[in-house]
Amino acid sequence: MKFDLSKKGLNISPSVTLEITARAKAMKDEGIDVISFGAGEPDFITPKNIRQEGIRIIEEGLVKYTPASGIIELKKAVCEKLKKENGLEYSPSNIIISSGAKHSIYNALMAIINPGDEVIVGVPYWVSYPELIRISGGKPVYIHTKEDRDFKFNVSDLDKVLTDNTKAVILNSPSNPTGSIYNEKELKEIANWAVKNNIFIISDEIYEQLAYDEKHKSIASFNDDIKNLTIVINGMSKAYAMTGWRIGYAAAHEDIVKVMSNLQSHTTSNPCSISQYASVAGLLGDQGSVLEMKKHFEKRRNYMANTINKIEGLSCRKPGGAFYIMVNITKVKGRILDGVKVNNSLDFAKVLLDKGNVAVIPGIGFGDDDYIRLSYATSMENIEEGLKRIKSIVESN
């Protein structure tokens, strides 16, 4: 039977990494010792104070519907956090709570994009950006960044792709997958460009607490002009190891938040009530667990970057934030490893999995086939063993 299905839905590309992920899972299920560097979530448990608050909320029965855009207690906590940590003054009417940061980005794009509007995205990009833009009716426009510029675009790059249809720029700092962080000078230049051209900035700051070498700066914090054009995206998943709790939030001009809230009220309604109340405890409670996780991530980053750069044929830049490293494989492409010719990042990922029992994410999933992405959101023991296996395969031929 052939169905007449949605053209928009059919045009959404599946993840090119699905094959690798599914194969790695199947191998693990068979009892094979697979080391995975694919994790997009902290390997730590949610801090105790947050877990305890979730239990308390369940026991007290606060499990009913909440306002579609989120409880006022969490909106106030977000406002307090943004003021204290980011120098941003917002009121609860500027805040919307959603089911994860990805949901917040979806709401933001749906609120500002009209058919044919263009959204500028840097390459390598987080895998969902292009598809979210297409779902909203927009067109992704790419800037291919360079490793020697720390995978960052600048105003000159933006000018080259600016058209009458340009509506927004997605800025991800710290970045997934590169770990790059835009410094204050770079952000100010982009902010001035956006104000001059009346372009929205969707500022994805979900990894802000995992900035190691310099303090995170929000582009919305410079002045009211850029603040009014910026939709700040953040959430609880990365900093508080709350991936499964599904709480993200956005801060923006009240007119934008109203549209986002209307969309959410007709699609998902409110995020999980238990997770919302627990998130209040996370934002307002002791931050010691966040700092402790960050210390572990920084130690792992240093070890992974230093070790990769000692493997013949591989190289990387030490990322400034998040928990990923983009590994340059250009010297491996074209070689035969363990009887398999490596033509691209997917081939290399397959060789590492089939011959070394190591799962990595091919760079083509992020728009750049010259790299693979490794996550250090796993134990130091796994990192050490996994890199030994990669070294053995790459240097054995």
Image (cartoon, rainbow, N blue to C red):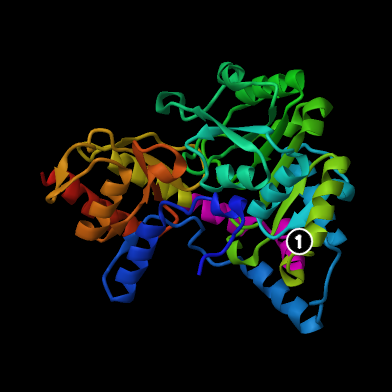
Residue plotted at (43% across, 46% down) = 365
Q: Specify start and end residues of the magenta stretch as a single range.
A: 276-296
Residue type indicated by callout 1: Thr
User: Could you tell whether 268 is left or right of 1 in the image?
Assistant: right
Residue 24: give x, y in percent of width and height.
Answer: 33, 64
Residue 386: give x, y in percent of width and height.
Answer: 28, 56
Nearer-the-camera pick, 7 or 80: 7
Quarter holding the C terminus is: top left
The reply to whether residue 291 is visible in this rendering is yes
Does 123 sit above or below residue 135? above
Nearer-the-camera pick, 64 or 7: 7
Does 309 sit above or below residue 236? above
Residue plotted at (61% across, 36% down) = 139
Secondary structure of residue under mark 1? helix
Residue plotted at (47% across, 30% down) = 151
Dot 1: within a 10 Å radius of its alpha carbon, few (fewer than 14), some, or many (20 or more) residues?
A: few
User: Could you tell whether 167 is left or right of 1 in the image?
Assistant: right
Q: Is residue 285 inside the magenta stretch? A: yes
Q: Name the residue under label 1.
A: 267
Residue 73: give x, y in percent of width and height.
Answer: 85, 61
